[in-house]
Amino acid sequence: MEPALLRVVLAGGTGHFGSRVARALLARPDVNLRLLVPPGTEESVLGDLADRGATVVEAELSDDGALDAALEGAHAVVSAVGASPMLLVAGQLHLLKAAQRQGVRRFIPSGYALNASALEDGEGASAEERLRVAETVARSGVGHTFVRVGSFMEVTLSPMAGLFDFHARRAYRWGSGEELFDVTSMEDAAHLLATVVDDPRAHNRRLEFSGDVVSFNGVVALYEEVTDKRLEVVDMGTLKELKARVLHGRDVGPPGLPRAAGPALLALLSGEARLHDAANSAYPQLTCVRVRDYLAHHFGANAPLEQASA
Ligand SMILES: NC(=O)c1ccc[n+]([C@@H]2O[C@H](COP(=O)([O-])OP(=O)(O)OC[C@H]3O[C@@H](n4cnc5c(N)ncnc54)[C@H](OP(=O)(O)O)[C@@H]3O)[C@@H](O)[C@H]2O)c1
């Protein structure tokens, strides 16, 4: 007998993370995937997702009627919309209400990486806003899962986070460099989502999952080991100094790092964003890319030329 189809609606499925989630969901033969996209979305941004079997439905996240039509009959709604307040707060709350009206069984909100809500009050409106969304989801009566994966490896190990610039062979250390943080590749996080979307063990809970746990100094050592190249480490200051800079809205990083990167950097290094109850052992089929593998793949001797050459 054919397995019953699981109808999933994915918002934000054309994004950096969302497109990986879409592919991971489409790899499940029992999933019927609807991609919820803003009206007027060009075919080119969908990549090969339609060819792989996704149905595209257009709806503004503020259009209740269009959302109801898009979610009709859906078992689960997964959101991977970007982090702007307009999407993460207003958009997702509309989506949640539609899920409520349509009797959706599982709602997985966006906001996977960095538990910024763990920051103290006053360290950024987005932390409070994320918390508000989480509380509303938890009280909504719609089955839900909050997925937390630490920070995305692709971001933390790139100049975007303000710590490592491997192409410039430079790294920027705050504090002792021994502070531990959790990192997970977007690909692994996407497979986790596709696995837990109908997993009863993930129902109405916060699910933590960690691809690897590393420190700044540990990443430097791994890079030097897998590439046989030295990194110049620039000491930026203490964590207290980092916190003061973030609180006063000042630049925190190497030239060119957007000020907005400060709160995430602080959340990462202060330990506030650490995961404490990673559920990895419950999902032994999900083997994760470790930081060593990631660095070897992108910068090691066998890395593609354009990545390894710098
Ligand atoms: N600190 C970290 O490690 C880290 C880093 C990155 C992301 N994240 C988290 O990962 C999640 C996804 O981020 P991302 O970087 O993948 O975002 P992204 O690439 O900016 O993608 C955002 C998605 O939202 C869609 N979208 C935009 N406006 C919309 C609208 N009005 N209605 C419906 N959809 C709309 C976009 O569609 P279009 O393509 O049509 O614009 C796109 O599919 C967020 O929760 C973010 O907080 C965390």
Image (cartoon, rainbow, N blue to C red):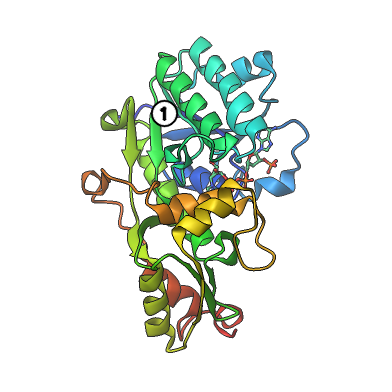
State the residue in front, 20 or 91.
91
For residue 200, what is the image quadrant?
top left
When the figure is inspected, residue 53 is found, relative to residue 63, above or below; the finding is below
- Where does the image place residue 115, in percent across and percent down from the top left? 43, 42
Q: Amino acid at mark 1?
A: Leu
Report whether residue 29 is seen. no
As drawn, 123 above or below 217: above
The residue lying toward the viewer, choosing from 246 and 4, is: 246
Residue 281 lies, in percent from the top left, at 21, 48
The residue labelled by disc 1 is 6
Label 1, secondary structure: give it.
strand
Which residue occupies 55% across, 66% down?
158
- Image check: 149 left or right of 44? left
The quadrant of the picture occupied by the C terminus is bottom right
Residue at image position (66%, 25%) is 61
Of all residues, the one furthest to the top in this rendering is: 101
Q: Which quadrant, please, contains the N terminus?
A: top left
Q: Left or right: where does residue 83 sit relative to residue 45?
A: left
The extreme left residue here reads 281
At label 1, counting other C-alpha atoms closer than 10 Å, the crowd grade (few under 14, some 14-19, many 20 or more) is some
Q: Is residue 198 visible?
A: yes
The residue closer to the viewer here, 23 or 188, is 188
Q: What residue lies at 59% left-to-right and 53% top-to-bottom?
A: 261
Of residues 202 and 66, which is closer to you in this image?
202
For ligand 1, give the image quadrant.
top right
Q: Is residue 67 above or below residue 226?
A: above
- Identify whether 175 is placed above or below 249: below
How many marks do you count on the picture?
1
